[in-house]
Amino acid sequence: MTIALDPSDATPTAPSPDLAADSAAVAEEPEFWVPEARGDGAATGAGPVVETAPDADPVVVQDARDFGVYARTGGWTFALKVARSVRPGGQPAEGTARAKVSAKTFAALAGCSPERVMRHYKAWDMAADDGLVPQFEVLVPGEDVELPDADVWLSYYTSRSSASSVRGRAISAAAEAEGIRPTKALEVAENPTALRAAILADPGTAEAARGALLDRMKEDPALQTELARAIATTEDLKKAVAHEAKAADRIAYVRQIAENGRVRTPAGQTVEAPAELRAEAERHLSLLDELDGSEEAGEWAGEAYEAVRGLVAKAVEEDPALRVQERRTRFYNSLQKATKVFEELTLDEVMEEDIYEEDMLQRLEALQEAIGSCISALRRATTASS
């Protein structure tokens, strides 16, 4: 019977006499291969029930039993053969270890690569460190031991050599944290072109990639900078970002009213929101929160914002004191802007450089006249109110 140690090997090889002998020896190793059966046909302890079929071909029976062992122990079956027979180069050959061979010799006998043999060796070594299996030193060729369950095997073994690198170990750890097999993640990492093709062709894969990039950006400032630069230099993306930012600001405006009961007026005042306004904001916010990820929020946000802003303007006009304060605030805002602009005029440059034009003086004289009129109007209003 030929058993391939690793399905990922693409090079077909003839089965070696040693492996054939191991398979033939299965029937002679009841403690390892076949659990002791009771008279009622059930295996002792936690072992599986061993069915008997008197008329079945012995070859079929042996295949079934071999399959059962592998189903229960998986790769540990082959790792044991490596662990008890291989002594990597450089290790001392003393006592029973003299019968062991190097990984290269074992691979030649098995008709596979030394790298595959060493992957099994390293998997056993890590499991031994965790106390799951015996250390190599106590194992002798042909010895059988109790093996862990098959589902534990993938926690220690990887069929990809990249898993041993720093990058590979990081990918494997992330895969385990996500609850997937490390080999799957490593395969994707080793084929970026295939990953790109899947993202371009499949919306689901693109969504998964987007989520992963957003999660990674939280701890990767360099990636944040690269993506920001890519957006800033791509016109369509710049427009999309501006559109989404505008929608987010409008939703935040509505949410502030609904959740905090406070409203910001057009002039910049923050006041208590009337009951009618708050109820309308809550209604629109509930509609926005019910949107799923595939729906465009921009149009809904714009509708909610305009509806709420209309009610804000109405509330300001219907409250005499609030209306006066709103106009006073608006006037102060305009006055501050005008003052700041005038203060930023660099008159020294006008005197030092030949930049004077007649139109400049005309504009300043018009501004002076407008300011004078404004001062006079304010004085008259002050006199009338006193």
Image: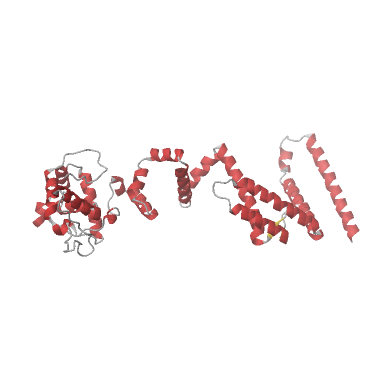
Quadrant of the image occupied by residue 188: top left
Residue 63 visible in the picture: yes
Q: Position of residue 147 (x, y in %)?
A: 21, 58
Question: Residue visible at 19% across and 45% down?
Answer: 3
Classify 193 as above or below 143.
above
Q: Quadrant of the N terminus?
A: top left
For this orientation, the residue located farthest to the front is: 55
Task: Using the rendered image of the protein, determine whether residue 139 is visible from the camera's viewpoint.
Answer: no
**Coloration mode:** secondary structure
Residue 201 image position (x, y, % from top left):
45, 38
Q: From this viewpoint, which residue is outermost toward the bottom?
A: 45
Picture coordinates of residue 217, whole percent (x, y) = 47, 49
Task: Find residue 176 and report its horizontal and vertical position in percent.
Answer: 36, 54
Is 354 on the left-hand or right-hand side of 11? right
> From what the image shows, is residue 250 above or below residue 350?
below
User: Closer to the camera, 58 or 220?
Assistant: 58
Q: Nearer the viewer, residue 172 or 30?
A: 30
Q: Is residue 118 above or below residue 145?
A: above
Between 24 and 181, the residue placed more toward the observer is 24
